[in-house]
Amino acid sequence: MPVHPAHPIDTAWPVDPVGPVAPARPVGTAVRVARLTRVYPAGRTPVTALAGVDVGFDRGTFTAVMGPSGSGKSTLLQTAAGLDRPTSGRVVIGDTDLSGLSETRLTELRRTRIGFVFQAFNLIGALTVEENIVLPLRLAGVRPDRAWLRRVVARVGLTDRLHHRPAALSGGQQQRVAIARALATRPEVIFCDEPTGALDSHTAAQVLTLLRAVVDEHGLTVVMVTHDPVAASYADRVLVLADGRMVAELPQLGAARIAEHLATLDGRAVR
Ligand SMILES: Nc1ncnc2c1ncn2[C@@H]1O[C@H](COP(=O)(O)OP(=O)(O)OP(=O)(O)O)[C@@H](O)[C@H]1O
């Protein structure tokens, strides 16, 4: 592994302007899944969590994935992100078909081309904020792009917190560290599983505004699983799953309209 400087996010250097760098939406598809099926062999009755999902996520877009509890949202995210292998069907990230990859190549791809943000932040308590942010780069043995990292840290508002440990930060700040970590490699797509599930509504709004800005200003692609219609209203479109199938695709709507649509879903309660 190459030797990296001790402080790849050298804030003694002038911070680059944080303004838009990708004003035009990038073209192409960041992720495509085709006939995606995942069956869990649970005892005598296998559970079909995904039953042939076809969907694409264009570059520079923000998609929310919603649906009743148990409808397959997390399974879709896990398989699309290469954390879990589908039973059948394909996942293509950029132009890489994941089904042909060995476990080692898949791990490499996850570290360099995919960002993850989870409800529980998943930061490493023994590492500083800066060390957490650059961890994916270190694991992948990739040289940090200092200018990009400085911009990311400034964008998430953590420049003066780099040497703190996560325990010294608020929940919202910890989630912003997780977002910075997800952005560190300039991934092709950022998958978020309930990123605001552990936050109060004010802090959640800040995190969602940040995710929106990541898409609008940097042309990145975000796919977010959420139960919250308010969170989903920050997205460009809302995909709705039920029983492992895609049952609706809604354009950008206000939270109330999203909640109305979900309530009409076969009378199912959406948690
Ligand atoms: N490891 C597993 N083994 C067996 N069944 C599983 C496993 N993981 C998920 N399932 C089942 O697959 C189905 C889809 O689960 P999944 O977690 O994807 O749903 P979800 O929409 O994310 O649910 P929630 O909103 O409650 O988080 C559910 O019936 C669930 O019980």
Image (cartoon, rainbow, N blue to C red):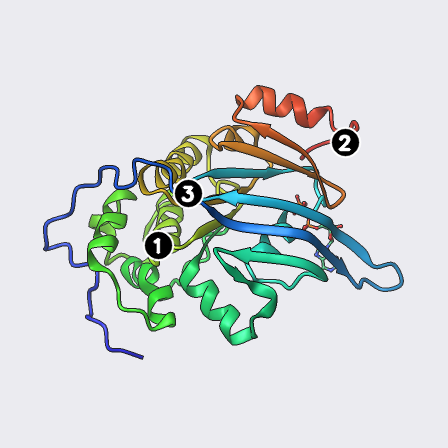
Q: Nearer the viewer, mark 3 or mark 1?
A: 3
Q: CA distance from mark 2 to mark 1?
A: 38 Å
Label 2 sits on residue: 268
Around disc 3, counting alpha carbons within 10 Å, would you say few (fewer than 14), some (14 to 19), or many (20 or more)? few
Q: Image height check: is 147 above or below 242?
A: below
Residue pictured at 52% horizontal, 21% vertical: 254
Provide residue 104's location: percent of width, then percent of height: 51, 75
Report the residue marked by disc 1. 186
The answer to which of marks 2 and 1 sits earlier in the sequence is: 1
Q: Amino acid at mark 3?
A: Val
Residue with the mark numbered 3 = 27
Q: Position of residue 92 (x, y in %)?
A: 55, 57
Disc 1 on helix, strand or loop? loop
At label 1, the amino acid type is: Arg
Tell me the mark number nearer the camera, choosing from 2 and 1: 1
Quadrant position of residue 59: top left
Towards the viewer: 89 or 250? 89
